[in-house]
Image (cartoon, grey):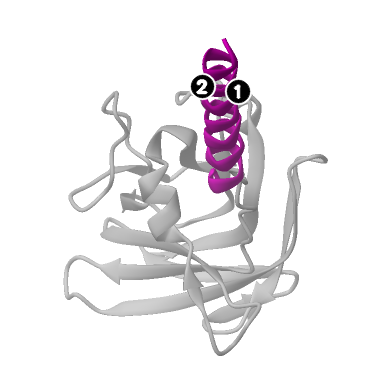
């Protein structure tokens, strides 16, 4: 009888020890906070492969308030409170947008890789206020599991001379990936930048 009690007690202790060790050995899963401090757009003229780089400093990133703001560009032409991107009429351009976290200058992180890894949870949307410019996804862009383009690489086509105000958004967990205004996409704004596209004849 005492032998059976001893065996049961030993078995119970082993089970409890296993459960305790298993719980302690399992690390807590933490959601990493996405930090974006800069957006970079490289604009390439497809007729001659000349390119211009525009850097946008992101001032703040706040999912709770669905707000992120640019300060201004460091390269390219700054026009008043807005960055001015100069384009030619009747032309095609490739726009490539990337995102960085350079809060530590000695360890700059390319956040675009994370956006691509989480393609189902992100999309870039350009809201154009004005006529004379259109854009579509193009080769080199990334698509999510349902075939939706992220718009990291787009082709822009210009017609007549015009000035178009552009607001570009990196949207996190959009409720839709189609629309004509920012509100159509839902979700939260990771990054918001603004620029003026000036089309010269």
Q: Is residue 129 visible?
A: no
Q: Quadrant of residue 82?
A: bottom right
Q: Residue 113: image x %, image y %? A: 38, 58
Q: Name the chief secondary structure element in magenta.
A: helix
Are the two marked residues, 2 and 1, in contact with CB atoms closer than 8 angstroms?
yes
Q: Is residue 103 above or below residue 43?
A: below
Q: Is residue 172 visible?
A: yes
Q: Residue 39: image x %, image y %? A: 54, 66
- Residue that label 1 marks: 9
Which label is found at residue 7?
Answer: 2
Relative side of 12 to 113, left or right? right
Q: Residue 47: image x %, image y %? A: 17, 68
Mark 1, other Cα within 10 Å: few <14 / some 14–19 / many ≥20: few
Relative side of 164 to 200, left or right? right
Q: Residue 85: image x %, image y %? A: 50, 69
Relative side of 33 to 151, left or right? right
User: Residue, x 48% and y 62% (percent of image)?
Assistant: 111
Magenta-colored stretch includes residue 25: yes
Q: Is residue 177 above or below residue 193?
A: above
Task: Give, as a single range, the part of the protein colored magenta.
Answer: 1-26
**Residue in front for this viewpoint, 193 or 121:** 121
């Amino acid at each position: 009888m005492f032998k059976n009690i001893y065996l049961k007690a030993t078995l119970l202790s082993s089970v409890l020890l296993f459960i305790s060790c298993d719980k302690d050995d399992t690390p807590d899963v933490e959601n990493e906070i996405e930090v974006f401090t800069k957006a970079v757009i490289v604009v390439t003229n497809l007729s001659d492969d000349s390119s211009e780089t525009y850097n946008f400093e992101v001032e703040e990133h706040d999912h709770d308030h669905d707000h992120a703001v640019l300060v201004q560009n460091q390269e390219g032409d700054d026009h008043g409170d807005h960055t001015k991107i100069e384009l030619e009429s009747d032309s095609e351009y490739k726009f490539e947008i990337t995102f960085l976290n350079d809060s530590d200058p000695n360890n700059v992180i390319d956040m675009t890789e994370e956006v691509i890894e989480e393609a189902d949870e992100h999309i870039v949307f350009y809201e154009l206020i004005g006529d004379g410019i259109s854009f579509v996804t193009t080769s080199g862009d990334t698509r999510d599991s349902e075939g939706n383009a992220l718009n990291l690489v787009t082709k822009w086509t210009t017609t007549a001379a015009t000035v178009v105000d552009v607001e570009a958004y990196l949207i996190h967990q959009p409720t839709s990936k189609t629309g004509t205004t920012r509100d159509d996409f839902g979700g939260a704004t990771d990054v918001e930048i603004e620029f003026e596209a000036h089309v010269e004849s």
